[in-house]
Amino acid sequence: MTDTIKIDAMTRDQAVAELARLADILARANVAYHTDDAPDISDAEYDQLKRRNAEIEAQFPDLKRDDSPSEQVGAPVADGFSKVTHAVAMLSLSNAFDDADVSEFDTRIRKYLGLGADTALSYTAEPKIDGLSLSLRYEDGVLTQAATRGDGAVGENVTANARTIDDIPATLERAPAILEVRGEVYMSHPDFEALNDRQAAAGQKTFANPRNAAAGSLRQLDANITRARPLRFFAYAWGALSDPLADSQMGAIERLCALGFQTNPLTRLCDGPEEMIAHYKLIEQERATLGYDIDGVVYKVNELGLQSRLGFRSTTPRWAVAHKFPAELAWTRLDAIDIQVGRTGALSPVARLTPVTVGGVVVSNATLHNEDYIAGRDNKGEQIRDGKDIRVGDWVQVYRAGDVIPKVADVDLSKRLKDAQPYIMPDRCPECNSEAVREPGDAVRRCTGGLICPAQAVEKLKHFVSRAAFDIDGLGAKQVEQFHSDKWIAEPADIFTLRDRYDTGLQQLKNREGWGEKSAANLFDAIDDRRNIGLGRMIFALGIRHVGEAAANLLATHYGTWDAFSTAMRTAEEGNDAWDDLLSIDGVGAVMAGSLATTFNQEAEIASIDRLVAHLNIEEAVRPDTSGSPVAGKTVVFTGTLEKMTRAEAKARAEALGAKVSGSVSAKTDLLVAGPGAGSKAKKAADLGIETIDEDGWLDLIGAL
Ligand SMILES: [Zn+2]
């Protein structure tokens, strides 16, 4: 949004229009945030728009509007609450967004006060609680009024509600006769989660974050509702006072603590920007484990005498600044790495985090993509996060922007536990315990339990009934989804027992939307029709990775029968004869062979396939008529340069005549056809005593010369 028009290049007319636009957006955002407790834009976006408004006003001071957003704090009092005029206005703070802003803050103050760089000047630094500001008025030690900030001048009277909060004392001893205590009402993380659970269980709206929950709970017209909500209060400032609390900010905080208020234990006295920034970093690191939301660190000039000399700009004090955390980043602890199995069998590691609020959203999970990502490498093997790996127990910086799934942006190695171990990706699927395999060139590890993996069941079943597979009339993807969710079909074999199991259950089918008695009977007939199935379709239907329709047909032609195929697959192992035979098929590479062998090596998978096969009559693959062929059943190898046909033609021709064409010479080879340039294969064939002929000899043999 900031790049709509560059401010330096803006004309006066554009500035007028832009200021009007920003005033409108920010006014609406204020009402959504403060009055309705339901923000419509992110905090970061709000800050950005407000900054843009201030920058335009600085460029065109005379165009500043009467209703300028810079002059506004919060929003007017909502209907239903009585109004309270604050004796001392409740202002907001100006913001610092980086270390340079903090140094500038110090420089500005020194300049204003005429202090040299060597003069000591101390500041307090405290977490900025992300809740709802509240002003409590005590007269002669008795709580008489509690008010929200409202627009800074006039707030909402929430006295009855404030009285229900345990952290707010009803009476004070030895307090000034008039004392307005200011602080933040907030909700702790555990209380927030429990409240949302109760709201959800009662069918009521849940809150996006603890701040909204705190604001929504305090600003209730019925104090009994507030009473039931676990709100807390930190005191950090004051308004009207009959006697000073102390002569320093730190002293005043200590006094408030002594009077019985909760004050934040992370409040520190700092000697200058360096210490302030160091304390900021410490708080930023601890943010996720504080148990409540904070969105930055507030610095205040410690000496109250200096605070009063510095005074105020229109809506903000000169002596304080809020150093905001980056809106999209937060540090938290990675408590565990869980594996999720996708519908296609991909194993995805997910980081379980100690919940942290990032940009107004509670983040408790982040994607870790795959094992390389966890190890600190991208998919090209290049380092990410400077090569830092991610381990359970690590402190990680989480990045979240817009609707993007949160990611781990960085790891703090200085906080890594001594016994933290590098993460090892499981080699078994957590859903079905089948092997999880990572193929060369694939960053993702995948479950091989195709038919038996519950995570993959629906996708596998849909594939099983697809057009090029079993293609059952009336049983498409939609019906499969439905039958699976009704637990009628868990694996393909179940399709063929449907009629038996649901002879009585016909009723159930009939009552389903779109199912009558006739359509149910038709479905069972269509299923019965498919008990006879071609070998190619059968192999394709199993949904083995890398085995597409064409490959399934090649396998079918090569092996001929289901028994031959499945026996070979069960025994194939890298290096043995069954493996070499599988690889000899033109169009079958090591990756597909590996995938087949792995599938037929899983006991549960084989059991599932056997259950299916028991219901089927798998037809032999139609093989070419090779009666009278001189090479039927022979294993032939072509090598060297062929001059009268291409290699592909030669293979196709040989296969049509019932020969098996292999890529390598072995003891099983019957015939080597060697063209010019034949090398090691010819030598090996000679060593093994295998008959070798040239191209013309081959053409003569098959009667093509
Ligand atoms: Zn699995």
Image (tube, helix red, strand yellow):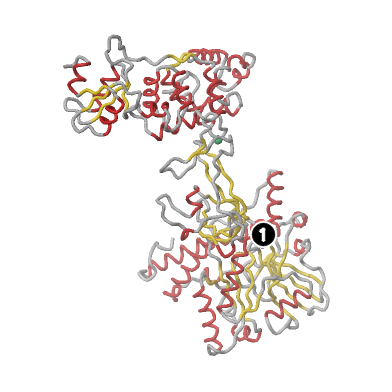
**Quarter of the image that includes the N terminus:** bottom left
> In the picture shown, does residue 511 fall above or below 271?
above
For the residue pair 403 and 495, the one nearer the viewer reads as 495
Label 1 sits on what residue type?
Ala
The residue wearing badge 1 is 215
Residue 514 on image: x %, y %: 54, 21
Residue lying at 21% horizontally and 20% vertically, measured from the top left = 698
Res. 421 image quadrant: bottom right
For the residue pair 318 and 344, the one nearer the viewer reads as 344
Q: Is residue 158 found left or right of 673 in the rendered image?
A: right
Q: Is residue 456 found left or right of 418 in the rendered image?
A: left
Residue lying at 71% horizontally and 51% vertically, measured from the top left = 194
Number of residue marks: 1
Res. 178 image quadrant: bottom right
Residue 32 on image: x %, y %: 58, 58
> In the picture shown, does residue 127 fall above or below 337?
below
For the residue pair 53 and 3, the one nearer the viewer reads as 3
Residue placed farthest to the top in the image? Answer: 628
> In the picture shown, does residue 562 fall above or below 223?
above
- Quick one: SS at disc 1? helix
Residue lying at 60% horizontally and 56% vertically, measured from the top left = 420
Q: Is residue 307 found left or right of 544 in the rendered image?
A: right
- Tell me, yes or no, if residue 28 can be seen here: no
